[in-house]
Amino acid sequence: MPPLLPGTWPGSLKARGGTMSVRKSERLLNLLIMLLAARGWVSRDRIRATIEGYHDLDDANFERTFERDKAELRSVGVPVEVDEEGDGYRIDRGAYELPPISFTPEELAALGAAARVWQDSVAADETRRALATLRAAGAEPDPSRLATLAPRLEAASHLNVWSEGVKERREIRFSYAGAARRVQPWVLFSRRGRWYVIGWDPEKEGRRRFRLDRVAGQPRAVGAAGAFNPPEKVSTDFGEEATTARIAVREGRGRDLLRGAPASADQTGAPPGFVVHDVPLGFGLAGEVCSLGADAVALDPAPLVAEVIAQLRHVAGGTR
């Protein structure tokens, strides 16, 4: 499971003492995102200069407002820390994020219902606005460090169908990558905010894994319960797959994407003016490549290349 916020952000804050002003809500969210995205301590002066709602205050009002905001975040479980000099701030991600959690099929079905609420959560829009505000002010937040804020349950709107399929041992039929597919689901699990199902594909006559946010339309459970017997143990390990991707990036661009990723010894396929880098292969990488537009090209592995193409076609408004 992805890390979860302690409390319901921003609703837990709004519930404290009535309705919170939009300005205060956005200021608190900006502060939270800035401290989460930072790779080290963030100085008080930088916070004041960057966060909308601070830099227009005089010294006394800034001190009072900043102290109240820190107390507000801490009151809902956000561990805002201060350095020894008392001028630098950060959020202890280890204390903020929850450890891996497993769920029963019944609990997964309940999460499927909760996902429909989170899907349209105001937190998602406020997060995007906050990131845009920080970038406009000259800050460089690292989006990969903000998984804590992301309500990554968008693929779970039909989670109850999959969980019932696993529980009742019923075959599921669905559309995937433009083709009609079947699977006898063995296990349903989440890895870094993405939901997966592993099971037996009767047509391919082999074990298959499917990512649920790539399923199109409504999956259907068919046939009688108890139609198959899953293995006693099903590995969800991704270890046998590629761990790095070859990404060609235009020189001088893509600093956030690369984050110190070395230049590849194999520069095959690099367009003129581009350098191929070995980038850790993680969830969300395709989106980061797409966000660079013409300044980045995914070269390997093939599943990543296919995902980048699919996302770009979706943005372009077609499914050619």
Image (cartoon, rainbow, N blue to C red):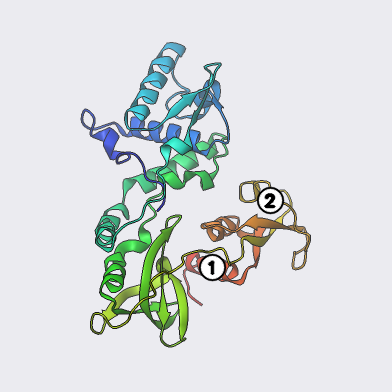
- Residue 292, image quadrant: bottom right
Check disc 2 and report the residue beneath it. Answer: 261
Amino acid type assigned to the residue bearing label 1 in the image? Glu
Q: How many marks?
A: 2
Determine whether the residue tagged by mark 2 lies in a helix, strand or loop.
loop
Q: Is residue 242 above or below residue 201?
A: above
Determine whether the residue tagged by mark 1 lies in a helix, strand or loop.
helix
Pick out the residue farthest to the top.
60
On the question of residue 252 being in view, the answer is yes
Q: Where is residue 290 in the image (x, y as percent from the top left)?
A: 57, 59
Residue drawn at x 42%, y 37% as measured from the top left: 96
In terms of depth relative to the viewer, which is nearer, 130 or 72?
72
- Specify the label residue 27 is tagged with: none
- Residue 225, image quadrant: bottom left
Pick out the residue farthest to the left.
18
- Residue 127, image quadrant: top left
Which comes sooner in the sequence, label 2 or label 1? 2
- Crowding at mark 1 (Cα within 10 Å: few <14, some 14-19, many 20+): some
Q: In this view, does 196 lie above or below 42?
A: below
Residue drawn at x 75%, y 64% as measured from the top left: 270
- Specify the label residue 307 is tagged with: 1
In terms of depth relative to the viewer, which is nearer, 48 or 96?
96
